[in-house]
Image (spheres, rainbow, N blue to C red):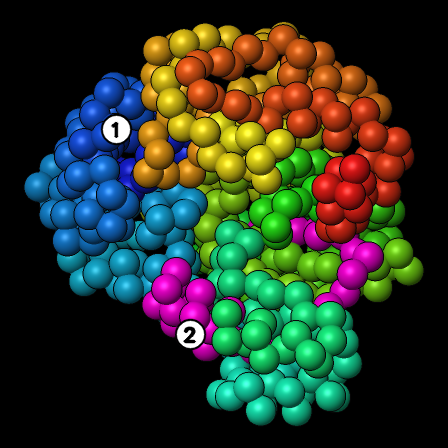
């Protein structure tokens, strides 16, 4: 096991990793920007190093400063959390070149699954079902249009390096393709530094289902069931739950085996997810693979009893997984609501500011992953997440009731600060959601349409 781990992130995930390290007897190094000098992860860590100004590219994305902090403090490994540098193969490679263990898959595997066109090809070779699409990035609008004629409309133009719900454009007809192609390429270049895109058939009335994967260096790969992430706005998740109301044991086993095949095909090690689209007839298709711990990982932890972050760290240290597939049992139901400093009435516009009041709920089956404190600040420079609220109960109906009670108990306020708390309560009260019939189009149809 490592003696010291540097956490190359901020916010609630930095606190989450720090706690896992503490339980393992591992010392921690926090990195922080000037805007985060008083943050919770800085106060809880054994050591802390400022890596730059508030702007992410000068701090949390500043590879030389982060690696320098690790070497200066004697850290043996780097945990990237999610976001920022967590899926950057160059960062993983630089860590390895400097004798640091990157807590995640190898740079080669990360490159393969991070390039969505390459990932599609690899997963198709492993036998996973695929939506019709271009077999490689399309080099021109004319090439995209030619594939579109074969695929049919509606379709999506996707950035090869996309992630976090960005780099995706739905195209309803041929008249819209040229504009969507140009805008997606331009956006992909600006956000990801890679303008390549591909086209794929768009599946409208589907669920977004992801399977949690853990794999060690000794040949053991397991899945820990699924999470239903269908409640989204602009392809970004807001509510996640597990198990999915749409899966029975037979379909769960089929999709789980497919996820394992995909992970093994790329030689995956560490924690990750294989993500699928699922239609009403039980047909599913590979969507993407994420090579990191997910925001919604607590849902799986609550229904399996497995500490995913601890297992992730152990695997990176060369240890074997402490269980196999036959040990994985799904117990009860868990749901997670992302509490963001956003105004749902203004298209979820971020509302940074000072948290004058901050009170979180508690009780049996209630978990709050957070870094926020009363009097603290939600900076304008980063993700607007304040906390993740998770509830568990023996069944879905009870988990939803517990979540509604917890949301009603939570208090977050400050000058100009709006949150998604009331929005979540409206979703939980919606008959479509309560019946377990929400698809990825749910918010647009039920809420944005009034």
Distance in Å between CA atoms under marks 1 and 2: 32 Å
Q: Where is residue 197 in the image (x, y as percent from the top left)?
A: 51, 76
Residue 209 magenta: yes
Question: Toward the viewer: 257 or 155?
Answer: 155
Q: Is mark 2 on a helix, strand or loop?
A: loop
- Which residue sits at x=88%, y=31%? 431
The answer to whether residue 66 is above or below residue 402 is: below
Question: Toward the viewer: 52 or 276?
Answer: 52
Q: Is 401 left, or right, of 301 in this rendering?
A: right
Q: Give the range drawn in magenta.
A: 184-213
Please give the residue where the numbered disc 2 appears in the rendered image. Answer: 195
Residue 12 visible, this orientation: yes
CA neighbours of label 2 inside 10 A, class few (<14), some (14 to 19), many (20+): many
Give the tally of numbered discs: 2
Q: Is mark 1 on a helix, strand or loop?
A: helix
Please give the residue where the numbered disc 1 appears in the rendered image. Answer: 36
Q: Where is residue 440 in the image (x, y as percent from the top left)?
A: 73, 50
- Which residue sits at x=58%, y=80%? 178
């Amino acid at each position: 096991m490592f003696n010291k781990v540097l956490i190359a992130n901020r916010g609630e995930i930095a606190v989450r990793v720090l706690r896992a390290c503490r339980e393992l007897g591992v010392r921690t190094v926090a990195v922080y920007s000037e805007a985060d000098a008083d943050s919770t992860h800085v106060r809880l860590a054994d050591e802390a190093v400022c890596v730059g100004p508030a702007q992410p590219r000068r701090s949390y994305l500043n590879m030389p400063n982060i690696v320098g902090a690790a070497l200066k403090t004697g850290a043996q490994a780097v945990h990237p959390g999610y976001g920022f540098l967590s899926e950057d193969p160059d960062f993983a490679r630089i860590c390895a070149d400097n004798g640091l263990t990157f807590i995640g898959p190898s740079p080669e595997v990360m490159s393969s699954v991070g390039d969505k066109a390459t990932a599609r090809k690899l997963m198709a070779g492993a036998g996973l079902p695929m939506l019709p699409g271009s077999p490689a990035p399309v080099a021109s609008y004319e090439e995209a249009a030619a594939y579109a004629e074969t695929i049919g409309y509606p379709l999506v133009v996707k950035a090869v390096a996309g992630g976090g719900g960005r780099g995706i454009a739905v195209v309803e007809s041929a008249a819209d393709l040229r504009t969507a192609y140009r805008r997606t390429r331009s956006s992909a270049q600006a956000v990801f530094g890679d303008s390549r895109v591909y086209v794929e058939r768009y599946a409208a009335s589907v669920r977004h289902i992801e399977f949690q994967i853990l794999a060690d260096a000794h040949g053991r790969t397991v899945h820990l069931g699924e999470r239903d992430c269908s409640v989204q706005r602009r392809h970004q998740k807001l509510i996640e739950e597990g198990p999915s109301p749409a899966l029975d044991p037979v379909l769960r086993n089929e999709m789980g085996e497919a996820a394992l095949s995909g992970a093994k095909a790329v030689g995956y090690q560490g924690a990750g997810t294989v993500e699928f689209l699922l239609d009403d007839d039980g047909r599913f298709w590979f969507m993407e693979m994420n090579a990191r711990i997910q925001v919604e990982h607590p849902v799986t932890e609550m229904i399996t009893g497995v500490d995913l972050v601890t297992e992730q760290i152990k695997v990176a240290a060369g240890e074997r997984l402490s269980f196999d597939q036959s040990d994985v049992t799904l117990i009860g139901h868990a749901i997670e609501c992302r509490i963001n400093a956003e105004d749902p009435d203004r298209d979820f516009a971020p509302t940074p500011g000072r948290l004058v009041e901050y009170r979180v709920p508690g009780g049996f089956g209630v978990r709050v992953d957070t870094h926020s404190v009363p009097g603290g600040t939600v900076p304008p420079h980063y993700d607007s997440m304040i906390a993740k609220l998770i509830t568990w109960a023996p069944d879905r109906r009870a988990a939803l009731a517990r979540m509604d009670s917890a949301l009603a108990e939570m208090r977050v306020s400050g000058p100009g600060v709006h949150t998604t708390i009331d929005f979540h309560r409206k979703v939980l009260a919606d008959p479509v959601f309560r019946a377990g019939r929400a698809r990825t189009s749910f918010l647009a149809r039920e809420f944005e349409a009034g």
